[in-house]
Image (tube, helix red, strand yellow):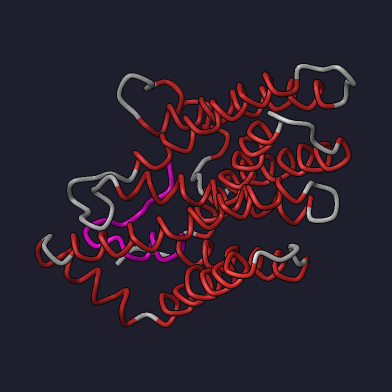
Amino acid sequence: MGTMEWPLVLFTVLGETAIGIIFVLWWLDRAEVDPIFYKKAALLSGLLLALALIASLFHLGRPEYAYRAVSHLSTSWLSREILCFLFAAVAWLYFYSQVRQPKGKRRLAAGITSTFGLLGIFSSSMIYVLPRVPAWDSVQTPLFFLLTTGLLGGLTCLVLGRKTLKLSQLQELLLIVFTCVLVSILSFAIYLSMLNTAGMEGMSTVQFLLASPLFWLRVVANWLLPLILLVTYFSKQKTINANLVIMLFIACSIGELLGRALFYLSAVGISITALK
């Protein structure tokens, strides 16, 4: 099996949450958005992106040589990941400068920043699409990374805007979250069935997951509890409760961290090593 790569877990999950926030802000900005909420969310996205980049350095064997990783753009997804995230960080500075201006081009800036960020996330996921690792070698890997982006980005904006956003906007965010949860459940079911037909390595991954308490904790936190809460809300169509939003955020955050940790632990056929 693989190893518990916490620097990579934090880098990917925090980075995806940051880009998810910016993408959601771009989406919400089609209509009027509370400026205080928008500024808080924009600032938080930058802080999370900075923390993600810092966490990534702890995975490097020699951080001072990190600049060398961008020298293989034509062949390396790692080089593309680093370059896209660096561009996203620079674009975020432009984005936040526009947010601070009363008539700044914040939607354009959010679009540019989220585009670089999404390209970085896709590049991150493609690093792991390796033929010798059945647990990673499928379209499911980039899908998992992108679902985390939408889920945690939407939930973070829900938490920040639960008292200031319009009801229609909150419901729109809940619908995004609900869609991400449903797609995550369905895609993971397909993923497990695919692994069962991927030889001994794939079957070993399935056995490992089903025997792991972390996996079942993730099932509860990431899928069952959010699904129950969301179905209950949509069936009653009442005013959005702040406690519902906070419970969803906590449960899904724990679930996504566990899911990413299991992603690295499930790597049968490879040992993740630090970049030299």
Prevailing secondary structure class for the magenta stretch in the rendered image: loop
> Would residue 183 appear left or right of 165 to someone viewing this image?
left
Q: Residue at x 28, y 45 (%)?
A: 139
Q: Quadrant of the C terminus?
A: top left
Point out the stretch of residues depicted in magenta. Answer: 260-276
* The stretch drawn in magenta includes residue 204: no
Is 271 in the magenta? yes
Residue at the spot 38% in from the left edge and 51% down from the top edge: 273
Q: Picture coordinates of residue 40 (x, y %)?
A: 83, 42
Q: Residue at x 59, y 73 (%)?
A: 232
Q: Position of residue 87 (x, y in %)?
A: 59, 23
Q: Is residue 244 above or below residue 29?
A: below
Left or right of 201 on screen, residue 128: right
Estimate the x, y position of residue 14 in percent, counting from the top left: 61, 49
Q: Is residue 104 above or below residue 197?
A: above
Q: Residue at x 79, y 39 (%)?
A: 43
Q: Where is residue 165 shown, x and y percent of the image?
A: 80, 47
The quadrant of the picture occupied by the N terminus is bottom left
In this rendered view, identify the residue nearer to me: 119 or 152.
Answer: 152
